[in-house]
Image (tube, rainbow, N blue to C red):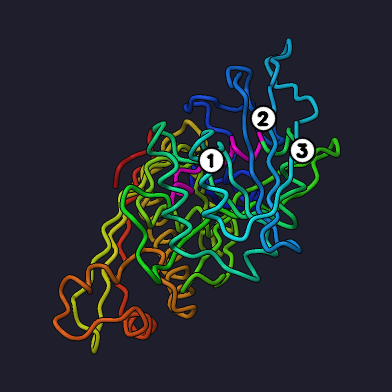
């Protein structure tokens, strides 16, 4: 007989649940087992811009849609007003946005990213767009051509809802400027087809090293990475448990606190990562202290496996190198840190607190 933790559902869970709708947010979504859709309170004009590779260098597609609420409070979208233009650089386009107002969502086609990457200068330019009206644009990489998502008003709005729900997608548009050669993380939207034929999307993490694409994480890994980065609001977090339990643990409405620090030595680097995870159990019945402790150790192992993968890729989305930079007295360079990270001794601890469960 299978034995499961009280807050664990046996068997594998769909990765789509990792980014299920959270009704705590403004402009929240309706979730009935399919993908979330924008609610009618999002009543203003929404501007979406797509960036693709083109004959003129940068092919940019912009669309404005004016949603109209329907009786069931789901959004109804008409055909968006679309215009296209070519630019030599992003700065040329941003000059126009600064005059007319920043778009709510900027999506970059996967082809452009694979050809040209995503530099920290772009992150800083886009982040500055939000200073004028106090709202930073949502930013993501999309599968295929960005123009396809822009021309679908429903897909664009659904993507915007998902990006708002995943707090980690605010990176790299943080309050501080991204430095040259900083390892960045962008949300990636792989487009799939829903049961009704409509476009649907999940959110994954796209990793960048030296401005070039270094790889993409699965939805489950993406949620774990966001937790390691100390994100305060995740719709869900799941991880594999031991073979004896034959299941996957899951928490909803998760908040994480993370402390990442190093010993300051590039010759014998040690990275310490302490993570506190709090979230709602998938069932109302409490788990025992032993069960929670076992789940915490399984989560710790999953985190450690992800960190090992980041080490192998020599990419530092956790910015562990920042603490080494502050302490290291020798000559510093991002490449020296990446070499040190690959062989660093990572010491990771997890404290798990499922709300409604017994605290270990």
Q: Position of residue 38 (x, y in %)?
A: 64, 27
Residue wearing tag 2: 37
Work out whether 192 lies above or below 253. Answer: below
Q: Give the distance between the C-alpha atoms of the residues marked 3 and 1, in whole angstroms.
A: 21 Å
Work out whether 100 lies above or below 327. Answer: above
Residue wearing tag 1: 97
- Crowding around mark 2 (Cα neighbors within 10 Å: few <14, some 14 to 19, many 20+) is many
- Crowding around mark 1 (Cα neighbors within 10 Å: few <14, some 14 to 19, many 20+) is some
Q: Position of residue 297 (x, y in %)?
A: 38, 61
**Residue 11 can be seen in this image:** no
**Residue 217 can be seen in this image:** yes
Between discs 3 and 1, the one toward the N terminus = 1
Q: Residue at x 57, y 49 (%)?
A: 93
Q: Give the distance between the C-alpha atoms of the residues marked 2 and 3, in whole angstroms.
A: 13 Å
User: How many numbered marks does the figure carry?
Assistant: 3
Q: Is residue 168 located in the magenta-colored stretch of the structure?
A: yes
């Amino acid at each position: 007989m299978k034995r499961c933790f009280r807050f664990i559902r046996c068997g594998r869970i769909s990765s789509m649940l990792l980014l299920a709708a959270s009704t705590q947010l403004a402009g929240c979504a309706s979730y009935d087992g399919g993908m979330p859709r924008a609610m009618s309170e999002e009543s203003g004009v929404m501007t979406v811009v797509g960036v693709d590779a083109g004959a003129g260098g940068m092919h940019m597609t912009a669309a404005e849609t004016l949603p109209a609420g329907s009786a069931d409070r789901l959004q109804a979208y008409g055909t968006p007003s679309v215009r296209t233009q070519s630019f030599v650089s992003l700065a040329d386009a941003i000059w126009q946005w600064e005059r007319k107002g920043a778009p709510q969502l900027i999506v970059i086609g996967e082809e452009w990213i694979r050809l040209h990457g995503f530099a920290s200068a772009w992150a800083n330019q886009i982040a500055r767009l939000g200073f004028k009206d106090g709202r930073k644009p949502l930013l993501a990489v999309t599968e295929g051509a960005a123009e396809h998502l822009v021309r679908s008003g429903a897909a664009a709005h659904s993507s915007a809802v998902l990006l708002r729900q995943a707090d980690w997608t605010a990176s790299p548009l943080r309050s501080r400027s991204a430095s040259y050669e900083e390892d960045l993380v962008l949300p990636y939207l792989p487009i799939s087809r829903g049961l009704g034929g409509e476009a649907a999307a999940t959110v994954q993490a796209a990793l960048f090293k030296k401005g070039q694409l270094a790889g993409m994480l699965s939805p489950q890994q993406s949620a774990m990475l966001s937790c390691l980065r100390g994100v305060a609001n995740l719709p869900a977090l799941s991880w594999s448990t031991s073979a004896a339990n034959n299941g996957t643990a899951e928490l909803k409405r998760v908040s994480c606190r993370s402390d990442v620090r190093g010993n300051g030595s590039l010759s014998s680097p040690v990275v310490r990562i302490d993570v506190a995870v709090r979230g709602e159990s998938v069932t109302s019945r409490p788990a025992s202290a032993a069960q929670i402790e076992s789940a915490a150790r399984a989560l710790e192992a999953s985190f450690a496996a992800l960190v090992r993968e980041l080490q192998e890729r020599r990419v530092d989305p956790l910015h562990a190198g920042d603490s080494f930079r502050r302490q290291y007295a020798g000559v510093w360079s991002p490449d020296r840190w990446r070499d040190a990270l690959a062989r660093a001794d990572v010491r990771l601890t997890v404290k798990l607190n499922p709300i409604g469960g017994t605290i270990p």
